[in-house]
DNA sequence: AAAGATATTGACCATTTGGTCAATAGAATC
DNA sequence: GATTCTATTGACCAAATGGTCAATATCTTT
């Protein structure tokens, strides 16, 4: 019948096409999670035949790993620039926690949770997950170390505290993924928790106008 | 050729067979996660034809949801009995946190993480996940409320604190799932965090022989 | 305009998934 | 021993997955 539902994709340079496919995968992941990043779904999204996606990517496993990295690393950069504008470690830590928990990144949280699960069967992804966790932890740790150096925070192991804090906010976000709606503000109580970890007086991390 | 790889399964009563299938699913989930709970995998594990599993279960979605509930609810019961033996809320909370984070339940943690992700596409599972989270939260909340009543803890919103604590430990466990090996003891720092949330002095939740 | 290079595609393939259903085998009952 | 009941099965099916490859269309160069 010769009824091609999709017109032939305009020819692009390999670099452009690769970028287009990566963007399609990224958009899919943000909208419907990593599980939606399939060969055909990405192809449809990019307006391209499935075979082209397979042609441009060594395997779906690595496309998923790359897509995860793309989604998550953008978040880290975003936070880093946000922190630069703040005066001291205490303000930075407060904003850091509140920003991560403000509920505006549930799409990214879903990607994180799926990555934890999928990493069990996708070694490339698992490696990337660890790398991205390291990046996050490094950001938090540097803030804590600055606070310790300034005499504002009190801990013997900034790295461990950073890991704990990261795990805590990840867990709270993951929880919100399932319980959206009937849960209270995520950021309010954790400040007290962090204060406890860093030997701060109650309310030290609260907003200050 | 008539070479049936598997001998015909001995006849059982429907109740027995249903239990056998449920147990097979449960074992699979604990060994390889919910993703491994497929029609054929469960059948093989139960020593039965795939069609029989389909016959005994309305759909795989509900089998997975039931399996999740089976795995997770057992954990809650386990913890509850453990807490009963302890004298006061402070001891209970300390043991509660340390037990959940002792790293001996990574198989269950994997099931949790997968459930969070799969719940997006399996509404039956999502409902069950919320129910089990409620159960966990209720246990924690009751401990906190007892502590507040005894004048040991200080908080205006035990329910919210319980949710936060639950999210925190879930996150730490999930983190450990990916980073097993090179991470420090999960339970040590969180005690300080909890102390911060409940207005306790530093070290109030530490082990006391 | 012709030739060459290559981005793109359709047509396959093997595998895995959940699921249906008539046929079969075996225990219980008559 | 014959009949009834039903637990169990094999043989299918449709759908979706990742992936391969020769053919085709389109741009670039001659």
Image (tube, coloured by chain):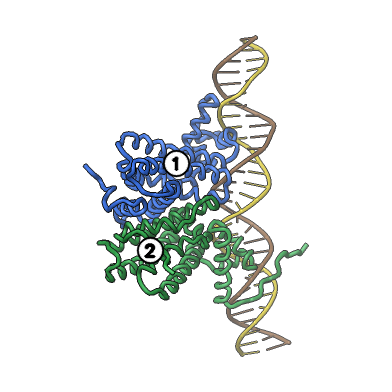
Chain colours: A green, B blue, C brown, D yellow
| Label 1 element class | helix
Examine the image and state in which quarter residue A157 appears: bottom left
Q: Does any portion of residue B1 appear in the rendered image?
A: no
Mark nearer the viewer, 2 or 1: 2
Tell me whether the residue at label 2 lies in contact with that at label 1, contact meaning CB atoms closer than 8 angstroms: no
Which label sits on residue A205?
2
Q: Secondary structure at mark 2?
A: loop
Q: Is residue A45 left or right of residue B36?
A: right
Q: Position of residue A204 (x, y in %)?
A: 36, 63
Along the line of sight, the residue nearer the viewer: A159 or A156: A156
Q: Residue at x 59, y 33 (%)?
A: B55
Where residue A208 appears, as percent x and y from the top left, is: 42, 67
Circle 1 sits on which residue? B138
On the rendered structure, is A136 left or right of A33? left
Q: On the rendered image, what quadrant is the C terminus of chain B found in?
A: top left
Graded by Cα atoms within 10 Å as few (under 14), some (14 to 19) or many (20 or more), the crowding at tag 2 reads many
- Is residue B24 rendered to the left or right of residue B105? right
Camera-side residue of B47 and A198: A198
Instruction: Specify whether residue B207 is in view.
Output: yes
Q: How crowded is the residue under tag 1: few (<14 C-alpha within 10 Å), some, or many (20+)?
A: some
Q: Position of residue B167 (x, y in %)?
A: 43, 51
Dividing the picture into quadrants, the one containing residue B183 is bottom left
Residue in the foreground of this view, choosing between A78 and A38: A78
What chain is tagged by disc 1?
A: B
**Residue that protrudes farthest toward the right in the picture:** A1
Task: Judge whether B128 appears above or below A137 on screen.
Answer: above
Rounded to the nearest angstrom, the CA distance separating label 2 from label 1 is 28 Å
Q: Chain of mark 2?
A: A
Please identify the quadrant where the N terminus of chain B is shown: top right
Q: Is residue C21 above or below residue B185?
A: above
Q: Looking at the rendered structure, which numbered label has been put on residue A77?
A: none
To the question of a shared chain for discs 2 and 1, the answer is: no
């Amino acid at each position: 019948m010769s009824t091609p539902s999709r017109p032939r994709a305009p020819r692009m340079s390999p670099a452009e096409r690769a970028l287009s496919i990566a963007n399609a995968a990224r958009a899919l992941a943000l909208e419907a999670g990593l599980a939606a990043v399939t060969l055909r779904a990405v192809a449809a999204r990019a307006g391209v035949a499935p075979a082209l996606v397979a042609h441009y990517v060594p395997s779906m496993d690595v496309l998923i790993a790359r897509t995860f990295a793309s989604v998550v690393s953008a978040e880290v950069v975003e936070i880093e620039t946000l922190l630069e504008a703040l005066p001291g470690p205490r303000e930075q830590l407060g904003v850091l926690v509140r920003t991560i928990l403000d509920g505006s990144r549930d799409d990214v949280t879903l990607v994180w949770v799926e990555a934890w699960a999928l990493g069990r069967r996708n070694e490339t992804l698992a490696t990337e997950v660890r790398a991205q966790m390291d990046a996050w932890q490094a950001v938090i740790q540097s803030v804590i170390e600055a606070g310790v150096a300034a005499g504002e925070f009190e801990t013997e192991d900034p790295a461990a505290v950073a890991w704990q804090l990261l795990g805590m906010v990840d867990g709270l976000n993951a929880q919100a993924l399932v319980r959206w709606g009937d849960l209270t503000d995520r950021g309010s109580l954790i400040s007290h928790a962090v204060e406890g970890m860093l030997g701060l007086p109650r309310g030290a991390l609260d907003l200050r106008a």
